[in-house]
Amino acid sequence: METYHIGFSIAALVARLFLGIIFVGQGYSRLFKVGSKHVADFFGEQLAGKNYPKWILPFSAYATSIAECIGGTLLILGLFRGIALSLLSIDILLVTLAFSIM
């Protein structure tokens, strides 16, 4: 039974590090490399002609980028895992809804 517990802990650590690196990389690239304004402009072009509030694209671009950076960092460090996973699950839900509108 002790081996199972160690194996589960190692698997959870690997999954946490893997997901944290993915989220930090995605959020970092949208905040500092591409820029959230360009991301919002790109989504605005994709949603041209659709009825949506104009303020939502810049807000969601910044909010999801920041959530991914902070949540990914918390996952990597293993701090506040529940809060980090909640932030990231809301982030994924918002992104999924946005892409389903397109």
Image (spheres, rainbow, N blue to C red):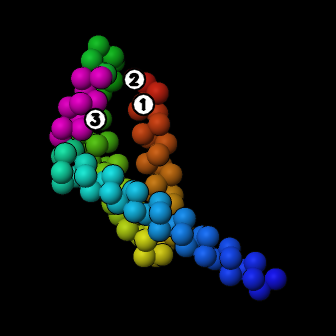
Residue 49 lies in quadrant: top left
Question: x and y percent of residue 74 in the render?
Answer: 41, 70
Amino acid type, mark 1: Phe
Q: Are marks 1 and 2 in contact (CB under 8 Å)?
A: yes
What residue is pinned by disc 2?
Answer: 102
Magenta segment includes 39? yes
Looking at the image, which residue is at 30% across and 35% down? 56
Give the residues drawn in magenta, as a range: 37-46
Looking at the image, which residue is at 41% across and 32% down? 98
Q: Which residue lies furthest to the top in this view?
A: 49
Looking at the image, which residue is at 24% across and 23% down? 45
Magenta segment includes 52? no
What residue is pinned by disc 3?
Answer: 57
What residue is pinned by disc 1?
Answer: 99
Task: Name the N-terminal-most of marks 1 and 3.
Answer: 3
Question: x and y percent of residue 50 in the render?
Answer: 33, 16
Local crowd size for mark 2, using a 10 Å CA cut-off: few (<14), some (14–19), many (≥20): few
Amino acid type, mark 2: Met
Give the alpha-carbon distance from disc 1 to disc 3, as whole Å: 12 Å
The answer to whether residue 55 shows anywhere in this view is no
Residue 2 lies in quadrant: bottom right
Q: Quadrant of the C terminus?
A: top left
Task: Answer with left or right where residue 3 lies relative to residue 79.
Answer: right
Local crowd size for mark 3, using a 10 Å CA cut-off: few (<14), some (14–19), many (≥20): many
Classify 50 as above or below 84. Answer: above
